[in-house]
Every structure is written in structure tokens, then in C-alpha cells.
Image (spheres, grey):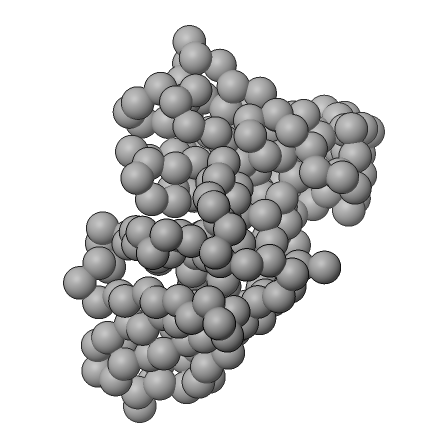
């Protein structure tokens, strides 16, 4: 299966943005979805794991969810800050690791 | 503290074989459910998963690159080695290794190593 993300999204500081990740086949809930943040020149870091869990140190502004009706996962970031500007990748499994194409978040 | 570090050549000639080593600490590849994956990223492009090896020696490969990849582990040295044959300039990019949890979360990543394929 493939995971499809929007190429880019943009929003103003303080606002809320949602990045979607649509699974092409198989149920979105059949395997966990993770979200990674990657800033330029750095390795990715986990912001959401197991669909909706936040690692320690990730602000509560980051929220993950899945929607079986649209077969998609979403990453919602509220109270946008300039430091949130980065590339975001969704990832799942079956039978190997599958990444989405990445979404560039611009905080205007 | 969990750390991973990639090492290998920075420059490879076309048609050569690339060998990369991921040296890790803070966890063991003998622990049930744990794995180590290799991921690459061409300049300015998206992440691409390459290969994954589990604690029980179960190995998974990207379908598109399967014929060129081999992943192996050395649990005594806490290392995972990836070989990729017949390198091409399109294989240029940063290569990362990452610890994989049972949930398939890539929980910890190395800093990455840039590999350039050029004659």
C-alpha cells in the first residue's frame, strides 16, 4: 500500500493546521501510524507514535488521530509556532516500513 | 541512553557495492520485538525505507530494491550492516539507521551519513 500526504501546507502562527495521510489499501487501523518531524539538515524525530501517542518532550499541541471512514490518519498541530516549520512524514507497516511522501509545513 | 551511528564511505563509484554499518548502544538486538532499519533520503526528497532486520533474524526489504540489498546483524558488536550492490548516481543521498519497536515505530535515529555516487 502507499501513504499519500499533501505536498505542502501553510498557516499563520497561533493557528491550527492538520496534515492528512491516506492509506491506499488495507485498513488504516490495521497497523499503527507514526508521524515524524524533520528539520533541515537533521534526522527525523517522532512526534506521534501508535496513532495518537506523544513521546515525552513533544508538546500537547501535537495530536494524532485515525479515521477509518476516510482510511486516513491526521496530525493536527495547534498554536502554531515558527519552530514547527519542518517536513512531516507519516509511516506505517505492512509487510515492511512504509513512509508517506512528506508534507512541508510553512508557518507564515 | 540509546544512540545509533552510521558509518561507511562518503564517495562510491558507479557499479560498486556500498557497505554501511550502523553501530548502536543502549539496547540489544536480542530483545524480542526489536529491529533496526535502514532508510535513505536523496537530497531534497522524501524518506525511503530500504531494509529491516529483527532480533530473530527476520529480514524485510523494500520490494523495489530487494535484489540489490542485504542486511545482516552482529549482536556481539551491536552492529547492523547494509550492503547495496550496483550503485548508481540516483542512489546519492543521506542514509539513516533507526531502532524499530514492536509497534513499527522508528523510535531512535542515527544522524545519517551522506553517500555520493560519482565517478
Of residues B5 and A47, the one drawn nearer to the viewer in this rendering: B5
Quadrant containing the C terminus of chain B is bottom left
Q: Residue at x 37, y 27 (%)?
A: A23
Quadrant containing the N terminus of chain B is bottom right
Say left or right for A60 vs B51.
right
Whether residue A36 is visible, yes or no, is yes
Whether residue A100 is visible, yes or no, is no
Q: In the rendering, at what x and y percent does residue A37 appear?
A: 62, 46
Q: Residue at x 22, y 54 (%)?
A: B64
Residue sitting at the far left: B67
Of residues A91 and B79, the one drawn nearer to the viewer in this rendering: B79
Q: Residue at x 47, y 46 (%)?
A: B32
Number of numbered callouts drawn: 0
Q: In the rendering, at what x and y percent does residue B31 appear?
A: 51, 51
Q: Is residue B24 above or below residue A101?
A: below
Quarter-of-image position of residue B12: bottom left
Q: In the rendering, at what x and y percent does residue A25 appear?
A: 28, 25
Of residues A61 and B73, the one drawn nearer to the viewer in this rendering: B73
Q: In the rendering, at what x and y percent does residue B59 appear?
A: 30, 54
Say left or right for A82 vs B117.
right
Residue sitting at the far bottom: B119
Q: Is residue B108 above or below residue A9?
A: below
Residue sitting at the far top: A69
Q: Is residue B110 above or below residue A44?
A: below
Amino acid at each position: 500500500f502507499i501513504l499519500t500526504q499533501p505536498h505542502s501546507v501553510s498557516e499563520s502562527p497561533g493557528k491550527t493546521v492538520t496534515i492528512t495521510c491516506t492509506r491506499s489499501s488495507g485498513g488504516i487501523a490495521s497497523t499503527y501510524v507514526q508521524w515524524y518531524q524533520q528539520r533541515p539538515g537533521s534526522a527525523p524525530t517522532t512526534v506521534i507514535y501508535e496513532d495518537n501517542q506523544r513521546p515525552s518532550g513533544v508538546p500537547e499541541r501535537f495530536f494524532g488521530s485515525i479515521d477509518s471512514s476516510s482510511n486516513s490518519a491526521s496530525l493536527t498541530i495547534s498554536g502554531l509556532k515558527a519552530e514547527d516549520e519542518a517536513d512531516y512524514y507519516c509511516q506505517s507497516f505492512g509487510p515492511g516500513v512504509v513512509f508517506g511522501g512528506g508534507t512541508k509545513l510553512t508557518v507564515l | 541512553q540509546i544512540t545509533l551511528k552510521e558509518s561507511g564511505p562518503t564517495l562510491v563509484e558507479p557499479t560498486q557495492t556500498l557497505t554501511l554499518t550502523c553501530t548502536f548502544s543502549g539496547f540489544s538486538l536480542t530483545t524480542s520485538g526489536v529491529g533496526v532499519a535502514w532508510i535513505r533520503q536523496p537530497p531534497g526528497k522524501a524518506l525511503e525505507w530500504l531494509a529491516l532486520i529483527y532480533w530473530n533474524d527476520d529480514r524485510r526489504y523494500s520490494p523495489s530494491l530487494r535484489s540489490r540489498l542485504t542486511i545482516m546483524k552482529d549482536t556481539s558488536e551491536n552492529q547492523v550492516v547494509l550492503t547495496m550492490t550496483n550503485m548508481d548516481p540516483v542512489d546519492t543521498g543521506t542514509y539513516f539507521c533507526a531502532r524499530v519497536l514492536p509497534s513499527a515505530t522508528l523510535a531512535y535515529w542515527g544522524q545519517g551519513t551522506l553517500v555520493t555516487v560519482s565517478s
